Amino acid sequence: MELERSVFNKAKHEFEYVNKNVLIAIDGIPLFGSDGEMPKYVLSNAILKIGNKTYKLQIDNMYNPWFGNNANGKFFKIENNGNQSVLKGVFSDGAGTYGAEWLIFGNSSIRTILTNDEDILFKYFEMNQ
C-alpha cells in the first residue's frame, strides 16, 4: 500500500466552527483527523496493490493521517473473502483518531466506513493484537 500526505492549504477551503474556535467541517463536510483545530496535513493519495491489480482508494475528508515521516503499517489490515477484500485502517497524528474501511471487489474499490466512533476504533485496534 502506498500512502502520501500533503500540507493542507487552508486558502482553498471554507470552514465551519462551533464556539467560534472549534473547527467541525471543511467545505461543508465533517472533519476527520483533528480535535477541532486546523489540520496540518491532508491524505493526498492512497494506492493499494493486490496481485497485478491496482486500486486508487477514496481519501476525501481524511486529515492529519499520521505523525512522523511515514504511516505505521501495524494500523492496517486486509481481509480476503472469496472474490472481495476489505481493507481496514486507523489514522491519527496523536489527536483526532479515526478509522476507514474500503471494500475491494473486482477492479473497483469504495470506502464504506469513515468514522471516529470509539466502538469501531477499538475493534480496529484489536485486529493488531
Image: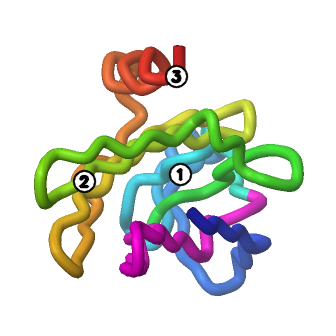
Q: Label 3 belongs to which residue?
A: 128
Seen at 58% across and 42% down, the residue is: 91
Seen at 45% across and 73% down, the residue is: 27
Q: How is the image coloured?
A: rainbow
The residue carrying pointer 2 sits among few (fewer than 14), some (14 to 19) or many (20 or more) residues within 10 Å by Cα, namely some
The residue carrying pointer 1 sits among few (fewer than 14), some (14 to 19) or many (20 or more) residues within 10 Å by Cα, namely few
The residue carrying pointer 3 sits among few (fewer than 14), some (14 to 19) or many (20 or more) residues within 10 Å by Cα, namely few
For marks 2 and 3, the one nearer the N-term is 2
Percent from the top left, x then y, of residue 24? 49, 48
Q: Is residue 124 above or below residue 56?
A: above
Nearer to us in this view, 15 or 41: 41
Percent from the top left, x then y, of residue 65? 64, 51
Secondary-structure class at tag 1 = strand
Q: Nearer the viewer, mark 2 or mark 1?
A: 2
Percent from the top left, x then y, of residue 75? 57, 36
Q: Nearer the viewer, mark 1 or mark 3?
A: 3
Q: Which amino acid does the dot numbered 1 rest on?
A: Tyr
Nearer to us in this view, 18 or 117: 117
Whole-angstrom CA distance, mark 2 to mark 3, is 17 Å
Residue furthest toward the bottom? Answer: 12
Q: Label 1 belongs to which residue?
A: 17
Using the rendered view, name the quadrant where residue 13 is placed: bottom right
Residue 43 sits inside the magenta stretch: yes
Secondary-structure class at tag 3 = loop
Q: Label 2 belongs to which residue?
A: 85
Which secondary structure class fits the magenta region best?
A: strand
Residue 7 sits inside the magenta stretch: no
Seen at 17% across and 67% down, the residue is: 105
Percent from the top left, x then y, of residue 103? 23, 57
Residue furthest toward the front? Answer: 51
Instruction: Specify start and end residues of the magenta stretch as a single range.
Output: 40-59
Q: Is residue 119 above or below residue 67?
A: above
